[in-house]
Amino acid sequence: MPGGTVVLIVSADPERVERDLVSAAVPCPACGGKLRPWGHARARVLRSSLGAVALRPRRARCRSCGMTHVLLSDGFLVRRVDSVEVIGAALLAAAAGAGHRSAAAVVDRPAATVRGWLRRARGALERIRVHFTRWAHALDPALAPILPASSALAGAVEAIAVAARAASLALGPRSPWCWASSLSAGALLANTNCPWPEPWNMGHPALVFA
């Protein structure tokens, strides 16, 4: 029986995604089977720093376990309208000491929206710091310890930045916040129970698409 539908973070290059799906080069994160094309999800409009972005994400289905996946670009996070770059810019501003209103002005978003992002992030700061620190050292075993930061939020953001640098060197260039999406399976600001790819799971589709 099919196991339901989950969101899977993939490359922002739709042609590459399609090519890899057709050639059965994408592993199922649930069972390791092969994902194949399975139509499209509903169309949606998301927001980047450049304005509205109309998307109709690809669907894929695993031939082995029957689970279907909505393939979302690593430029976004699960259940967030705004791009990960916009959200990341607000987190960076807050980590530098800005309040939520000042951070909202930096990214040109409503203060209430940015306050929600910051609240969600602050509820998972230690998880974020530990998770990305582990990824950083797994990708670069020679990496020096990450030094303590001025605040818990700054420490979490620094861990993301260090892991992103290591990932770009080891797996291929990608923007730091796209790596933040990939290495958290798009769940950086989602419920804290959402599973994130572990450093030993180097075959996770979000990393295969690097």
Image (cartoon, helix red, strand yellow):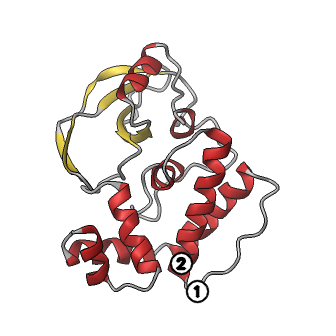
Which residue: 17% across, 37% down? Answer: 43
Using the image, determine if residue 189 lies above or below residue 27: below
Q: Position of residue 124 (x, y in %)?
A: 49, 72
Taking 199 as reference, is 208 left or right? Answer: left
Looking at this view, is 197 or 104 the one in front? Answer: 104
Say if mark 1 contacts mark 2, CB within 8 Å.
yes
Residue tagged 2: 154
Compared to residue 140, the image places residue 171 above or below, namely above
Q: Is residue 65 left or right of residue 85?
A: right
Please report the residue visible at 53 percent of the width from the left and 53 percent of the height from the top: 196
Q: Position of residue 46 (x, y in %)?
A: 21, 49
Which sits in the foreground, 92 or 23?
92
* Quarter of the C terminus within the rendering: top right
Label 1 amino acid? Ser
Residue that carries the numbered disc 1 in the rendered image:
150
Q: Amino acid at mark 2?
A: Ala
Q: Secondary structure at mark 1?
A: loop
Q: In this view of the protein, which residue sits in the foreground, 144 or 119?
A: 144
Q: How many marks?
A: 2
In whole angstroms, how far apart are the C-alphas of marks 1 and 2?
6 Å
- Residue 127 makes an appearance in the image: no
